[in-house]
Image: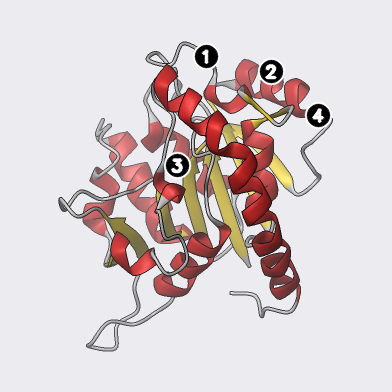
Amino acid sequence: MRSAVILAGGSSSRLGEEKALLLFGGRPLICWTAELLCSVADEIVVVARDEAHACHLEKATEDWLSDRIALTWDSVPGFGPVAGLDAGLRKARGQFAFATGCDLPFLNAGVVDRLFELACCKDCRGEGYEAAVPVQPNGLFEPLHSVYHREKMGESCRLAVENGERRIYAPLQQLHFNRVPMERLRPTDPDLLSFFNLNTREDLERARSLWPKRQAKYRLRHSALESDRRYRPSL
């Protein structure tokens, strides 16, 4: 069984609008994200910043989100994404879980599927990995575009919260993870737009200009992945 965890509790201070509810094609962005992830995961967990925010998201998206989506909220309100991951991984049930934010309008289902595969690989010594984490050319990780062993990463996040460690990179230090150069993902996503996130008004304008073309291209790909998922053995 595969899970996906979407963190939706950020403040969106630079953008000035709630990212999860930005409209694309007449629907909130988080609904598109959840729909896409349903093609490669068996369950989706959306993490709000607190209980009131969870109720707000549920009401705002009730016409679009399916019964495969579960809602929860940060284990420690205001702590940041580590507390969001902590809560989301507690709620999830799959052996492996993809973790992402709610601000990636061109998230690529094929890339996510490949990361699930790479998280389940073994290293040259025959040891199993506990995560697959994309690495930028400058060496920085993409921890919110990664697949994790749910129990191992969940334990690391809980320890980070207990120790007051807010950095999203902190839980990674406890894991044996597969470092995936982003260039390895170009065959699936030539422009690597899966990693494009929304931080500014300029980002939002660019995303909306690209949206129609990308949706037409990806719809066929996601339909094929959904068909494959129905016949894929559970992890």
Q: Quadrant of residue 60?
A: top right
Residue to which mark 3 is pinned:
85
Residue to which mark 4 is pinned:
62
SS at badge 2: helix
In the figure, 155 relative to 235: above or below?
above
Q: On the rendered structure, is 76 left or right of 225?
A: left
**Considering only order in the chain, which callout, 2 or 1, is on the residue closer to the N terminus?**
1
Write the residue at 42% across / 27% down: 203
Question: Residue 199's mark?
Answer: none
Write the residue at 70% across / 69% down: 224
**Considering only order in the chain, which callout, 4 or 2, is on the residue closer to the N terminus?**
2
Percent coordinates x, y for residue 197 in the rendering: 42, 36
SS at badge 3: helix
**Considering only order in the chain, which callout, 1 or 3, is on the residue closer to the N terminus?**
1
Query: Front-most of 5 and 134?
Result: 134
Q: Quadrant of residue 228?
A: bottom right
Residue 162 in sight here = yes
